Structure formats: structure tokens, C-alpha cells
Amino acid sequence: MPRLESCTWSCSCTARGRHKNHLGDTAAGLAAKVGEMLSSSVSSSSLALVGRGARSPSTSSVSSNTSSSSTLNLSQHLVQRSVVLFVVGAFMALVLNLLQIQRNVTLFPEEVISTIFSSAWWVPPCCGTAAAVVGLLYPCIDSHLGEPHKFKREWASVMRCIAVFVGINHASAKLDFANNVQLSLTLAALSLGLWWTFDRSRSGLGLGITIAFVATLITQFLVYNGVYQYTSPDFLYIRSWLPCIFFSGGVTVGNIGRQLAMGIPEKPHND
């Protein structure tokens, strides 16, 4: 019996030792696997960071190139629009001023009338510059206010607007009324009709009134200093209907500028 008990005790001790050794081997294997997994995850994350760092310069360079190219395109488009507006303004100034001179509405010195264009040399560049400024200002104000102009956006409508403006200017020199007040009221109604027919925007109305006011002040300053003069002045050295001509001209040039700027994305209207 003592031998059997000692044998049993030795067997149980041996089994426990083997079980402990097996558990130790299993724990060591698990620890090794966990270490390998951690090392692989760290290496993969480091590679990903390295890849992102390697890709970020190229991405930033592409974005900078895109922004620079878009800025260059916008500047080129702006210069082209300015040139077109300048040429249109200078040509219209020559034609309409010649009509006013032939009807003896405006009077220039004799040496000016004897020139090839029958107008002062400064009239075309000044009117062309004013047309470029006004034509660029209209779409800029529309974009700033977030109210894109959508009413009759087509070149056919713009050409009709130009024809109506020329007709209003022609009427100011051709029509004969009992007094200048009746002529001024008629031209004012025609100018508002031009705005209602081809514009109908609050920005167009506000800019037209502002342009008429500023241009009238400049004209009064020029006439006061003897640069040229008007026959039968009835409103501070000028004709009372002249602000109507400036208003309709501003609306017309503004529509031309808006049509030229159709290729530029505009801000959505915020109701």
C-alpha cells in the first residue's frame, strides 16, 4: 500500500508538471504571436504614414497648379471683356456724339469740329473707359449680392437693347417739343421702359440711377470749365434730359457686360 500511494503521488506530480509545462509553452506561443501582430501593425501604420507623406506634396502641387491656372483664365477673361467693352463704348460715343453735333445739341470749338472724327480726341477713350468700368461692375454687383441676372440672357435681347438706346439718343436730338420739360419726361419714360424690357433687376435700376447722377455731375463740371457746351441749357449748364441718356446707356452697357460674363460661375441666389 505505501508503494502504491507513493507511485500514485509521483504520477500525479509528474502529470501536474507536464500540465504546467504545456501551459507555459502555450502562453509563450501566444505572447510571441501577439508580439508579431503588434510589430506587423506598427510597420503597416508607419508605411501608411510614409505613403501619405510621400503623396501629400504631389496633391498640394496639383491643387496649387489648378488654382493658378483658374486664376490665369479668369484674368485673361477679364482682360478680353474689358477690351470688348472699351471698343463698344468708344464706337458708340463717336456715333452718338456725331449725331448730337450735327443737330447742334452740343457745341465744340471750331478746331475740334474740323478733325476727321468731328469730335474731341478725349471723347472716345473716356467713354470707352467708362463703358469698360460699367460693363464689369454690373456682373460683379450681381455676384456680390448673390442675385444672378437671368432675365433675357441672350445676344438677340442685348442687340435689341442697343437699338432702343440708339433710338432714345436719336429722339433726344430729333424730337421737337414745346419745351425741354416735355422732352425730358418722354425720354425718362422711354429709359424706364428700356430698363423694364431688358433688365428688371434692382441692381440694374440702382446702378443706372447712380451712373446717371455721377455722369451728370462730370458733364456739368466739363461744361462749367468751357470744355464744350450745350445749346439751350435748362438744367445747370446742360439739358434736363441728359440724365435719361446716361441712365439708358448704363443699363445697355450693363447688359453687354453681363452677357460677356456668362462663362463665369455666379453665386446662387439666397431667398
Image (cartoon, rainbow, N blue to C red):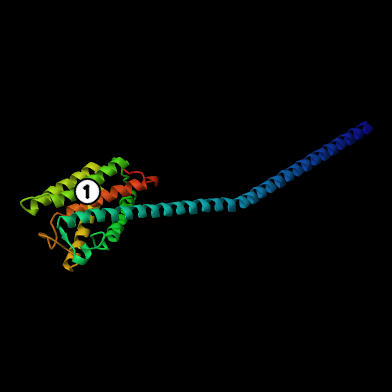
Left or right? Give the position of 35 relative to 262. right
Quadrant of the rendered image containing residue 9: top right
Q: Which residue is at the far right?
A: 3
Residue 110 in percent (x, y) is at 19, 65
Residue 250 in view, yes or no: yes
- Looking at the rendered image, the quarter that the N terminus falls into is top right
Viewer-nearest residue: 95 or 207 = 95
Q: Secondary structure at mark 1?
A: helix
Residue 153 in view, yes or no: no
- Looking at the rendered image, the quarter that the C terminus falls into is top left
Q: Residue at x 70, y 48 (%)?
A: 43
Viewer-nearest residue: 29 or 148 = 148
Disc 1: which residue: 166
Q: Which residue is at the far bottom?
A: 225
Residue 186 in percent (x, y) is at 12, 48
Q: Callout 1 environment at 10 Å: few (<14), some (14 to 19), or many (20+)?
A: some
Left or right? Give the position of 190 relative to 263. left
Residue 131 in percent (x, y) is at 29, 55
Viewer-nearest residue: 252 or 86 = 86
Q: Which residue is at the far left?
A: 178
Residue 71 in percent (x, y) is at 45, 53
Q: How many marks?
A: 1
Viewer-nearest residue: 39 or 184 = 184
Quadrant of the rendered image containing residue 227: bottom left
Q: Residue at x 20, y 57 (%)?
A: 213
Left or right? Give the position of 174 relative to 162. left
Q: Amino acid at mark 1?
A: Val
